[in-house]
Image (cartoon, grey):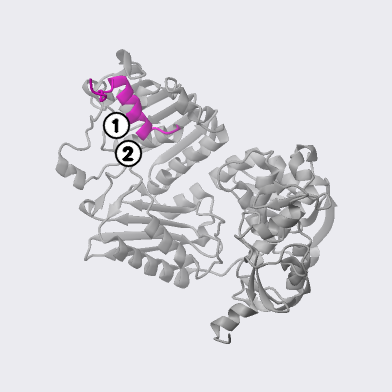
Amino acid sequence: MGNVRILAPEVISKIAAGEVVERPASVVKELMENSLDAEASSIEVSLKDAGKKEIIIKDNGTGIEQDDLEKIFLRHTTSKISSIEDLFAIKSLGFRGEALYSIAAISDVVLTSKTKSEDSAYEIHLRGGDKINFRPSAFKEHGTEIRINELFFNTPARRKFLKSNSAEIQQVLNIFIPYTLLYPDKRFLLSHQDKNLIDLKSTLSHKERIAEALHLESKYILESSQDLPQRNIRIKLFAGDINISRARRDLQYLFVNNRPVFNKNISFHLNQCFRLIMPDNTFGFFVVLIDMPPEDIDVNIHPTKKEIKMKDEQELCFILKQFCEQTLMQKGSTKESIFPLPPNSIQNTIKPARGSNEIQESLEHIFDNAKTFFTRGNIASPQKAQTAVTENKYYLPSDIKFPGQETTLEKKLAAANYIGQFSNKYLLFESERSLLVVDQHAAAERIGYETIIRQISKNSVEVQRLLSPVLIKLTAQELIAYEELQNILDKFGFENNQWDQETIAIHTHPRIFSDVERAVRNIFSGEVIDKNNIDALARRACRASIKAGDIVNADAANYHKKQLLNCVDPFTCPHGRPIIVEVKEEFLDKQFLRT
């Protein structure tokens, strides 16, 4: 008897559902695309428990005819395509005929719809893919409303991998916002627990919609368009000037034929353009809309339809890069200071931190007379602390002498003389027989990280009090993080309050951070972190230290050397990158054939 068996239909349905529906955000994406394909001018999304308990999507589109209501929940049923040739000229967002089938297989679904030509609406109810009932409904207006309850109720293994409500809402926002940018003429509403997160009215201006949806200043958004008639391609670009910068790529959007997509190649080339006006590890804002012949792209790559293939992609990347560079250099403005006050308006003070008992005990003893030692994120015992540095080949040359011998890298740095800065990125120190190269940003991150942790553990954060607050406009995703971490900002020394629906005001900041906005945004960036994870939040905040590209004079370089030598781990930054590289005289002699 053979070992190969045909899977049961209920098993096949759950496998297919796993390819399309990963989390509540996946459901929102598929159903929003259906609403947009139905030519809806208004889309409302309502969530409970971040969509784990309930997702309701209502639109005023064309609706679904009575005869089609049962068909749409069958696998591979669609009104978007009818032949294999249609796959090479797809104009709709959906076309695979799997979304509703997959969603119904793992949830409780009630769909109500009415077309303009029908006198009454009809409702169909399915649970786990099985039809419960089909009946007329009192739904009066044309359009469709679909309610998804108990997502993953029959696939508990998938449900247990869902994250916190804040994290899942962040994912929904990442799906929802791109469509609001793409269709400024449509109204979008997103609410959670009966609280509106996004409420955008229709507008005829792309630029106005982008500024409103992303909470950006319209005056910093540059707009350009370009036609490529030889390839029947039209490009529209919205790019932020030097006044819009982020620590990560969270304000970068690419659309091809009215479809949100990700393309690593295009993203790389566009980010290279921003290196002309921004330092490393700082990312700009852009929205790129590309219209091209449908036959020149292939969206049938993955069930999520996020990835695409394009004809002559490398040539298009080169054109986009030139176009973006020209826009930034010709239309961009100068950097505006976020501190309009004179220097004497800033007062230094010591502010006790709140709730220091929440800090993990493992962090409190790290700085207790250096009895323990960090090694790439692991805490070494006191007995191993002296050898931990030399054993890590990642950031130290193999021929460094062990503790107890005559010279160590730490002693070399202590005795070294500062001789200059290279490329506004590295600090150069001359030792007796070698050159020590210090990454200024990595060093500043280590100093800032250990300083803020030490001060929090002692319940006394050194802060600068501002006579006028720094106002920071947050994106919808950052506002979700702010609700979770507002009290943590106080603990870090960022005394704050909500200024308006989109803006927070910072009244004090830790003295070690000069770029207040960058430090705050870094804390909010990425997935939501547990508010008790002070270590991880401190690592994010310290990214606002001295950056590559900052000019450092001799006094500042020597001061940072002294501060670095006082660190428990002066050889790696909080994120694991090396801080110091030693170039020995023997190495240089070999390069110049002196040996």
Question: Toward which corner of the image does residue 186 lie, by quadrant?
Answer: top left
Badge 2 element: loop
Badge 1 element: loop
Q: Nearer the viewer, residue 248 or 367?
A: 367
Q: Earlier in the sequence, mark 2 or mark 1?
A: 1
Q: Is residue 506 above or below residue 20?
A: below
Mark 2 and mark 1 in contact? Answer it, CB < 8 Å.
yes
Q: CA distance from mark 2 to mark 1?
A: 8 Å
Q: Is residue 62 above or below residue 86?
A: above
- Disc sitting over residue 535 in the figure: none
**Can residue 520 be seen in the rendering of this structure?**
no
- Disc sitting over residue 98 in the figure: 1
Q: Nearer the viewer, residue 225 or 553?
A: 553
x then y, percent, for residue 128: 36, 19
Is the residue marked by circle 2 packed among few (<14), some (14-19), or many (20+) residues within 10 Å? some
Identity, as a three-letter code, of the amino acid under mark 1? Glu
- Disc sitting over residue 303 in the figure: 2
Q: Is residue 17 magenta?
A: yes
Q: Quadrant of the C terminus?
A: bottom right
Question: Toward which corner of the image does residue 58 lie, by quadrant?
Answer: top left
**Can residue 196 be seen in the rendering of this structure?**
yes
x then y, percent, for residue 405: 77, 66
- The answer to whether 517 appears left or right of 363 in the picture is left
Q: Is residue 433 magenta?
A: no
Taking the spot 42% from the left edge, 46% from the top edge, the residue there is: 178
x then y, percent, for residue 73: 28, 24
Q: Is residue 85 above or below residue 243?
A: above
Q: Nearer the viewer, residue 101 or 429?
A: 429
Taking the spot 24% from the left edge, 45% from the top edge, the residue there is: 91
Is the residue marked by circle 1 packed among few (<14), some (14-19), or many (20+) residues within 10 Å? many
- The answer to whether 21 appears left or right of 516 in the picture is left
Q: Which residues are magenta?
A: 1-23
